[in-house]
Image (spheres, rainbow, N blue to C red):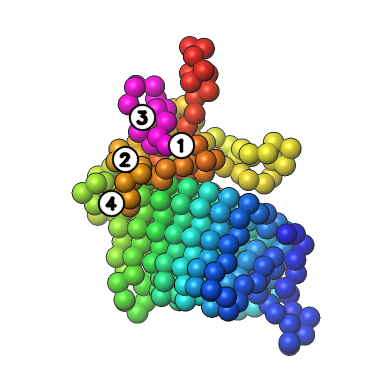
Amino acid sequence: ITNGNAIPLNAFSSQSGGGILVENVTNFNLLNSVLYSNKANTGGGISTDSVNNVLISFSDISFNLITDGNTNADGAAIYHNSTGQMKIQNSFIHNNFKDATVPQCRNAIINRNTDDDMYVFSSTISHNSGIGNTCMDGIYAQNGNLYLVNTTIIGNGNVGISFFDSPPNNYNLFVRNSIIADNANKDCDVSTGIINFGDIYGGHNLISDLSCTIFTTTGNLLNTNPQLSVAKSIFPTTGFLFNYYEPLFNSPAIDQGSNLPVNVGNPNACQMYDQLFRVRPIDGNGDGNAICDIGAVEYLDLIFKNGFQ
């Protein structure tokens, strides 16, 4: 879906969901899809309202725009304002932006006042920014639970993750086996709610600064360069879509994820499949002990795996 335009032409026009607007349904699934170069005031790619369950799987949401100076303009990629859960898995959310008519800092993904859960599994949220004022967060959750597992959040124009529980209601930010790195201002803006980057099983997150309110460093790598590749694409002929970032051969993320079995239902464990649907874990460092990598994508040394060394 491309070139959708939800900018109001008159007082009766919708201003939400440049590519897709979903309202008043029980379930909505976006599978194997591309939302590209759409624009709106809220939800440049997709906006959801009054939806019980939203699933976004193996989809690319990129180069969408919020515009028009609307004080509520937000969610350049996704604006989730439903009293229901959203799950994003094996997806690519990148290069969404706001134009100069939106002066405030805004967000690529926003989970706003849902009183419910947003899950992001084996996905990459990267290089969302703006024109002129580049201040854009990767993902923002307000008054809703946010769970990130094997997710890479990198290179966004302001903050990687923003999380607010206000007034306090014990909402959860749960982060495991994830990379949050190289975001322009800082990696995290989290100060309220139940902040959980690790427990007795460890967190196994890689953060490039010290902003993420981590009370235990067990299994976490802080103030660490993730050593990721430049953007790659699943489809080389369309290199600006389905972008992902693979650990380089010397990345500290390799084989540093959770060593729990991936298929036992433990929320601390890695996801069974990486962003490219490769089965975890892969023995990336070749020591004979396969442990999953931190982040959305497993390192795969094709030369080593094919026996040429």
**Mark identifier at residue 261:** 2
What is the three-letter code of the residue carrying label 4?
Answer: Gly
The residue where tag 4 is placed is 198
Q: Which label's residue is closer to the chain start, 2 or 3?
A: 2
The residue where tag 1 is placed is 279
Above/below status of 233 relative to 39 = above
- Residue at left 69%, top 65%? 19
Q: Which label's residue is closer to the chain start, 2 or 4?
A: 4
The residue where tag 3 is placed is 290
Distance, label 3 to label 4, CA atoms, is 21 Å
- Residue at left 39%, top 25%? 285
Q: Which label's residue is closer to the chain start, 3 or 4?
A: 4
* Left or right: 177 in relation to 184: left
Distance, label 3 to label 1, CA atoms, is 11 Å
What is the three-letter code of the residue carrying label 3?
Answer: Ala
Residue 116 seen from this side: yes
Whether 110 is among the magenta residues is no
Residue span colored magenta: 279-292
Residue 295, x across and y down, in percent: 44, 43
The kind of secondary structure element at disc 1 is: loop
CB atoms of marks 3 and 4 within 8 Å: no
Above/below status of 13 relative to 1 = below
Residue 299, x across and y down, in percent: 47, 32
What is the three-letter code of the residue carrying label 2?
Answer: Pro
* Left or right: 289 in relation to 94: left
- Residue 174 image-quadrant placement: bottom left
Distance, label 2 to label 3, CA atoms, is 11 Å
Crowd class of label 3 (few under 14; some 14 to 19; many from 20; radius 10 Å) = some
Distance, label 1 to label 2, CA atoms, is 12 Å
